[in-house]
Each structure stands twice: as C-alpha cells, then as structure tokens.
Amino acid sequence: MIAPSDLPDEQRIVITGIGLTAPNGNDLAQFRESVLAGKSGVTGYEIRYVGATLAGACNFDEFRHQGRKERRRGTRAGSIGIYCSHEAIADAGLEWKNVDPAAVGVYVGVTEHGNVETENEIYELKGFDYDIKFWSHHHNPRTVANNPAGEIALNRGITGPHYTIGAACAAGNAGIIQGAQMLRLRECDVALAGGVSEAIHTFGIFASFKAQGALASHDDPAKASRPFDKARNGIVVSEGGGMYVLERLADAKPRGARIYGEIAGYAINTDATDFVLPNPERQAECMRQALRRAGIAPDQVDIVSTHATGTTTGDTQECDALRRVFCESSRTRFNNTKSMIGHAMGAAGILELTGNLPAFQDGVCHATINVDDLDPQCDLPGLTINEPREMGKVNYILNNSFGMLGINSVLIVKRI
C-alpha cells in the first residue's frame, strides 16, 4: 500500500475549509474552545408525544446565508448544510466567482432524512380531519433523500454532482471519504463534504431509543452524555452539521491555501451480524484497513476519536476493538466528543473529527467529560478523561464512526 506522502500531489486530498454548527459552537474556534474547556451543549428539551427529555440543540443564524422564503420551503437539515457550506467556503479563501460551478461536488452524509417533515404533515393534517388537500406540496422535495445536498447546491448555484450518503451514524466520515474519492477520480475539483443532522426535530428517534431503553437521562443535562462511565444510561440525541472544503494538494498549494490536514487513510466495512449490536472484530478490521491505507502502524496514531455513544454494549465493544488494534501503542490517546455534544447522528463523525483537528496546531488531546466512575471494561491505557492532555506534536488522528445495520467507518487525517 502506497502512503499518501508518496502519492503525486494530484492524488493527495487536503482539508482547506471548515464550517460547522454544534450544540456548543458555531465555528471552529468557538467549538475548539468549548471542547478544551469541557463545555457541554446538552440542555433540557421537549418533543411532542415524548415530552420532557434532553438534547443537543444548535443555535446558529439560519438567515445568515439564505432568505426566509428559501428557509420556509426547505428543511432544518438543508439549512444546517447551507450554513456550514458557506462558512467552509469562506474559511477556505476560495474566490467563489472564479470557481467553475460544474466542477464542485456536494457529498453529504445523513443518518436519516424526511421523518421530520412527514411527522409534521401528519400532525397538522390531524387538525383538518385528515383531509389531504391540506397536505403541503413542499413535502416531496423536502423528504427526498438527496435534500440536504440539493439545498446546498441550489443555494450556491452548484451544477456539479450532489447527493447524500446514507450511512447511519457512520455518515459523517462517509461524506468525507466520498468527497476524497471523487476528487481522486477527477469527478470534481472542489468537494463540499461532510454530514448533517436534524434528528432532534423528529419524535420518532426519541421514542425508539426510549422504547429500546437507550435514551439517556440525568438531573443535570450537562452530565447526561457519559461514555465510558459506569452510570451511563444511553444516548443524548443531537443535531448539527459540519462541511469541509476538500481539494487536491496540487490545487491547494498554488493558491497558498491554509491546510488543516490531509486525508491519509480510510475504510468502511460491515459487521453483517446484527441490526443494532456492534461487532468488535469487524470494527478492529476496519481500523486496521484504514491504517494499512495510510501506510502507518497503530503506534503512530496520536489521537483516536472514539465513537462511543454512552450505551453499555456499544462502549464496551468499541473498547474491545481498540484493545485489539492499539494493544502495543503506549503513545496513543483516546477521547470522546459526544460527552459534550451528544450524538449528532449523521454529523457525529465530522463534528468529532473537527473537535480534534486543531490538535495539529496546539498539541492538546481534549478530554472525555462526565467520567466519574470509569467502567473497568472501558479502561483503556491512554484514555483521556476529565482533563485535556498536552501531547506535544500531533501527527495522526484516527476517527471512528459506527452505525446501525453494522456499518463501520474509520478516517485517518495527518498533519501536513
């Protein structure tokens, strides 16, 4: 396997722009400040039929980059994607008027899409005795699977390829991987890639997790998301989004672009064992495949951003997989961003990677918060809990994102 640094610059893919909204920040600087401070964005929340619960809600200006009519016709997920894409393009320093719109691709990871709109229409229709003449004609374009990517393309006037990647909670990584692959295939020259989630606006996801006994609860919302802790009791549902500008190094260099990191390796595989329960053997295989593609050994990875959701089985199985891969690595540190933002579903992977990317500059591994009593089955050497850890130079970050139906994704980014 050829390491990325041995590839020609035409095949090396780099991150040159970042746009995000998370429950505890609306840009990279604010988000990084929050995760280093251990600031939670989880709050009390109420959703129809379920009632009082907890969630990670975002607070960004929906009308900063779109008009009220556009927002009214569209979706929350589309609005998140539009906001993040505008911020990423500005951050990349691209002269948009000089960018060929046909050479831009939009690749957005989603866990699910359309539930919110259908639930809302049925709820409203009930008040009209289910007379379908009151059903919104906007329902179909709002609920088609490509909606979030399509809303971005419409808003930005992009005429290149756009589509979503449905990959459950592995989708944030999958969107980035797709963007990198399309750049290498020269299907586009600029990729807007990432993931979005409007999950907190559908009662169905809360109801399902609650029925499964997997919905987190706590008297203090900020302490509800507690991966690795003995007292963890489930998932905190969150919304959010993150979009990257990805370019070939050969294009980024001449314009003097700031480079956040290089896509060094990636892998996606499938457990093929259960609808929900994870398989640590397959997760370990996915990490090993990504490492082989990056041309590095496990002990060269400085930070592993874990997927751990705060469920008993999910956390312990991932820790099992991590031990299989990193058993001989004394340098590697492990952390978890969900402890501060909850589980942002389709946006989880990209937000968790983004929370760690600034470590290439500041050399700090952010902590996992809310670990008051570490579960012995989650006791990993190098697990960073409650306080950030100074690491010095950070060269490689590995990001895990796993999802239902046994989909696993691993993304490795390197310092450049």
Image: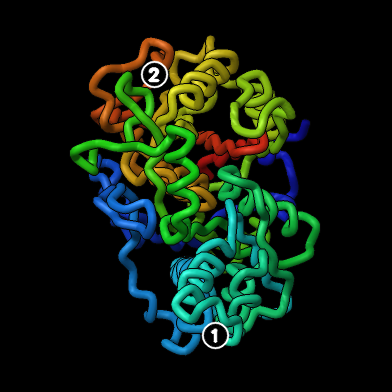
Label 1 close to label 2 by CB (< 8 Å)? no
Q: Residue type at mark 1? A: Phe
Circle 2: is it few (<14), some (14-19), or many (20+) Cα within 10 Å?
A: some
Residue occupying image coordinates x 76% and y 34%: 2
Q: Which residue is drawn at 52% across and 60% down?
A: 243
Residue 59 visible, this angle? yes
Badge 1 or badge 2: first in the primary sequence:
1
- Secondary structure beneath dot 1 equals helix
- Which residue in the structure is indicated by mark 2? 382
Residue of label 1: 134
Which residue is most to the left?
A: 220
Q: What element carries label 2?
A: loop
Q: Work out how far the residue at label 1 is from the one at label 2, CA to CA, in angstroms.
A: 57 Å
Of residue 310 and residue 134, the one placed in the foreground of this image is 134
Q: Where is residue 391 in the image (x, y as percent from the top left)?
A: 35, 28
Q: Which quadrant would residue 87 be assigned to in this image?
A: bottom left
Q: Is residue 339 left or right of residue 292?
A: left
Residue 82 can be seen, yes or no: no
Q: Say how many tags the image has.
A: 2
Task: Tell me which colouring the rendered structure shows.
Answer: rainbow
Residue type at the position of mark 2: Gly
Residue 407, horizontal then vertical, whole percent: 66, 37
In-front residue for pair 117/170: 117
Classify residue 60 as left or right of residue 257.
left
| Placement of 225 over or under 372, stated as above or below | below
Residue at (61, 20) in percent of width and height: 280
